[in-house]
Amino acid sequence: MERILDAFEKLLRKSSYETITINDIAAESSTGAGSIYARFDGKRSILLALHARTRDRARKYFQGLFNPAVREGESLEQAIERITRGMLSWHKRQRYIIRTSLLLNDPDIYEGISASFRPWSEQLALLLKARGAPLSDEAASAAAVAIIQITIAALQQRVIFGLIAPVGHDLSDDQLVNIINAAALGQVHSLSPPMV
């Protein structure tokens, strides 16, 4: 099964989902088409399995990225930049799977993506408070959800289109990180109590 998933992932780097056939996957994985059909219903079920495997890998990666105990001496700004760069790096490495998954407009995949980020908003809320954000628990949760939504939306646009609307042109990684960081810090500051 891993060979089939590895082969499909490799093929997605070279070809579009629509053009890949079961025979292509069989040839790439050195497996017979009958063996593939014994494990999967077709390309969609292979993609769902590949997406589930990617989510499992993401879970491990993001657990370290969002952990409040990591790099305890960093500032709030440094933590947000580290997380943004880490999320950008993940999206770039997984762009072929992510792009294919999003363009298929599959509700199972969308639910999987949504469910995979729920625990990270809780971790991010803890991290924001641990890095000195003057937020109540409720405000930290709201800021974390907004930061993740902003970041994911921008990174998914980058993965799918190569552009970030409404800018209309490709941004360098540093420009994209700076924009996301400014939006993230804006969320924190907008939810912080007013200074007296």
Image: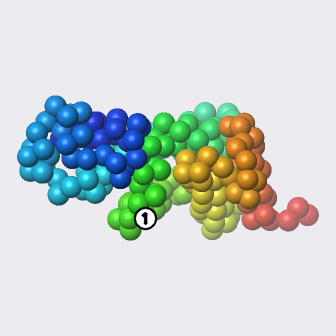
Nearer-the-camera pick, 194 or 108 = 108
The residue at which mark 1 appears reads as: 105
For the C terminus, the image quarter is: bottom right
Q: Residues within 10 Å of mark 1 (few under 14, many from 20)?
A: few
Residue under the point 75% across and 65% down: 191
**Under tag 1, what secondary structure?**
loop
* In-image side of 137 versus 2 (left or right): right
Q: Which residue is drawn at 54% across and 51% down?
A: 160
Residue 59: x %, y % from top left? 41, 46
Q: Say which of 80 and 92 sits in front.
A: 92
Q: In this view, does 7 lie to the left or right of 95?
A: left
Q: Quarter holding the N terminus?
A: top left
Q: Is residue 34 left or right of residue 177?
A: left
Name the side, left or right, on which 109 lies relative to 87: left
Q: Nearer the viewer, residue 148 or 26?
A: 26
Q: Using the rendered view, name the quadrant where residue 86 is placed.
A: top right
Q: Position of residue 29 (x, y in %)?
A: 20, 34
The colour scheme used here is rainbow
Query: Hey, which residue is sitting farthest front in the picture?
Result: 19
In the image, residue 62 sits, relative to residue 113, either above or below, namely: above
Residue 87 figure quarter: top right
Callout 1 amino acid = Asn
Image point (9%, 50%), residue name: 38
**How many numbered markers are drawn?**
1
Residue drawn at point x = 63 percent, y = 43 percent: 84
Residue 11, compared with residue 139, is above or below; it is: above
Q: Can residue 51 be seen in this view?
A: no
Question: Does residue 71 sit above or below 99 in this rendering?
Answer: above
Please say whether residue 153 is visible from this viewpoint.
yes
Location of residue 85 in the rendering, given as x and y in whole percent from the top left corner: 62, 38
